[in-house]
Image (cartoon, rainbow, N blue to C red):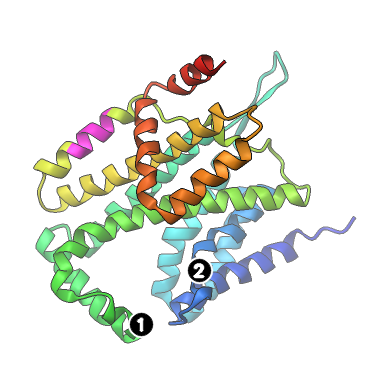
Amino acid sequence: MKNYKYPHILIASLAQCLFFLFPMSGNTGFLWILVYLCPIPIMYIGIRYDWKHSALTAIISSLFVYYADYKLAIFNGLVFCIPSIYLCYLLMLNKLNPKTEERSWFPISLLITNILKLGMSLLILLIIYIGPGFEEYISRLSLFYSSAFEVRPDLEQIINLSTMELIAYTLPVLFILFFILIFIMNIWLSLKLTKANGHLRRPHPNFHNINLPNAYIYYLLISLAGSFIGFGIIKVLCITFSFGLLLCYSINGLSILHYVTIGMNLRPLILVIVYTLIIIFIPFIVPLTILGILDYNNQMRYKINFNRR
């Protein structure tokens, strides 16, 4: 049998480079969505082979991007490549029980919390780079948007520099929300792709098994308190972390819904209706977020399922 490993790596590297550079070159329209798929080529290689090959894919892709612009290469490496390699490593992490000869895999719940930690770590580094002081932070953002308008003039109609203080609070929130959603979506798609072609080397993780560690409810309370009583950069980070945790609890709420509908004849219809409502009317996610928070001790789904039976 021929070994197509390295041709696959080269194709994945070129695809990742294309997904990243096409939107960054000023192209607008539907194909701008390609930037959200940047992790897929790296994660596909990591799941199909191993994290070392995903690292090789990321290095080759970064070299291609570096040829276009070294600053974009740094951004691509920090935001997409390094997290993708790390998550591939965690996803394929396993341990064999010598007594039962059963292999246990890294739980998907901890994978989601690690995505949140990665996003917050990158955000802190980015804010420190932009300016540790709040005034300096806003000033650097203003300069960034002024230069961004030269590449993307269409943004000038959307963003008003007079609202820069509001942007200073909302931009980190949008970053962490998109970061979590992008990597969850790319992990799911990468697993589906490898499973479809018969190269998935681990059991497909079940979405209904997602639950957050018990301590995260205290992190949420502390970050919410910091959002109200904090100031400057501390307030920005607390607001961002709060929204990141709330999104994780929303995912936890969806996981509960997946769990309690197991065995129902109308399960596919119920899930389709719920996801459609969330897409059409985003505030519908609030009840699921509350449900996820109420499950802070990871017992809510079992109680609901027990009462239903």
- Left or right side of 169 for 297: right
Q: Earlier in the sequence, mark 2 or mark 1?
A: 2
Q: Residues within 10 Å of mark 2 (few under 14, many from 20)?
A: some
Residue topped by disc 2: 33
Total marks in image: 2
The residue depicted at 68 percent of the width and 35 percent of the height is 203
In this rendering, the answer to whether 132 lies above or below 98 is: below
Q: Amino acid at mark 2?
A: Ile
Relative placement, left or right, of 48 versus 4 is left
Instruction: Tell me the SS state at disc 2.
Output: helix
The part of the chain drawn in magenta is 218-224
- 135 lies above or below 281: below
Q: Position of residue 264 (x, y in %)?
A: 63, 29
**Quarter of the image where the N terminus is located:** bottom right
220 is within the stretch colored magenta = yes
Secondary structure mostly seen in magenta is: helix
Residue in view at x 50 percent, y 44 percent: 274
Neighbor class of circle 1 (other Cα within 10 Å; few <14, some 14-19, many 20+) is some
